[in-house]
Image (tube, grey):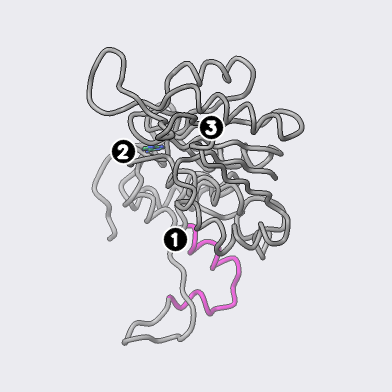
Amino acid sequence: MRLDIVTIFPEYLEPLNVSLVGKARARGQLDVRIHDLRQWAHDKHNTVDDTPYGGGPGMVMKPEPWGEALDAVLASGEGEPVVVVPTPSGEPFTQQLAVELSAKPWLVFTPARYEGIDRRVIEEYGDRLDVREVSIGDYVLAGGEAPVLVMVEAVARLLPGVLGNAASHQDDSFAPGAMADLLEGPVYTKPPEWRGRTIPEVLVSGHHGKIARWRRDEAFRRTDRNRPDLIERADPAAFDKHDRAILAALGWSPREDGRFGRTSEAVEE
Ligand code: ADE
């Protein structure tokens, strides 16, 4: 997969040389190219921003440097990339979007500083390319570089051969599949006792069925506590008899449409 990132802070993307993404680059699985937007700003101060039309606080990124930068990046590759524009006003970045992007051969990221990029840039390239405005969450950062680090890591770990154990992202929280609507439960490793704290007996029972059931129950408990909205919107067809029992114990019951709602306090902790 090829990734191009156009930014005024190339050094902000140094972490892409480290760990999983760094190793994928070293192995040639990821071709990451970082470009300094100021290369395409031609005045004495390499200006990339200006005051907003209509007034208001902050500065807006000028269209000309972005246009030249994107033209150069597009001309340097084969075919058409998906252009990912990080912005708090974008569609939510989800595991599903990460999976979708991981299937593309070429992504171009345009992290902005200030109040964002002149709208005409998004329109110009949106007329020709798949341009996705994407938010990593309901909070405002100082720029799109940190969101790019987040999105690149989420996408890169899905590429074939990038994670050591291919099965290890199948049961991620939010991954499609049997655990789709649940958060992952707790995990333990050696030693069996630490500061007087032991591990759940079932995990050393060798009984795979019981372990799977325990993990699923724990996933329900954690989802109930941290993300009840996931249970509310889950397709109840995915819930078996045991799931329904643990949901009932946690204070959930089926509504008229079959989906679950919290109806009472939990009977267990
Ligand atoms: N730029 C600033 N805040 C952002 C956010 N939450 N997501 C994506 N890009 C951003």
> For the stretch drawn in magenta, what is the main secondary structure?
helix
Label 3 to label 1: alpha-carbon separation: 48 Å
Q: In which quarter of the image is the C terminus?
A: bottom left
Residue 153 colored in magenta in the image: no
State which mark lies toward you, 2 or 3.
3
Q: Residue at x 64, y 30 (%)?
A: 72
Observer-nearest of 191 and 31: 31
Q: Would you say the residues marked 3 and 1 are in contact, meaning their CB atoms lie under 8 Å apart? A: no
Q: Earlier in the sequence, mark 3 or mark 1?
A: 3
Question: Residue extending furthest front?
Answer: 44
The secondary structure type at the circle numbered 1 is: loop
Q: What residue type is labelled 3?
A: Trp
Q: What element carries label 3?
A: helix
Residue 195 sits above or below residue 40 on the image: below
Query: How far apart in space, not on screen, are marks 1 and 2 (Cα)?
Result: 29 Å
* 2 or 3: tag closer to the N-terminus: 3
Taking the image in four quarters, ligand 1 sits in the one at: top left
Q: Name the residue under label 1.
A: 185
Residue situated in front as seen by the camera: 42 or 173: 42
Name the residue beneath numbered marker 2.
Answer: 140
Q: Residue at x 46, y 86 (%)?
A: 191
Residue located farthest toward the top when viewing the structure as drawn: 54
User: Would you say the residues marked 2 and 3 are in contact, meaning their CB atoms lie under 8 Å apart?
Assistant: no
Residue pictured at 50% horizontal, 20% vertical: 121
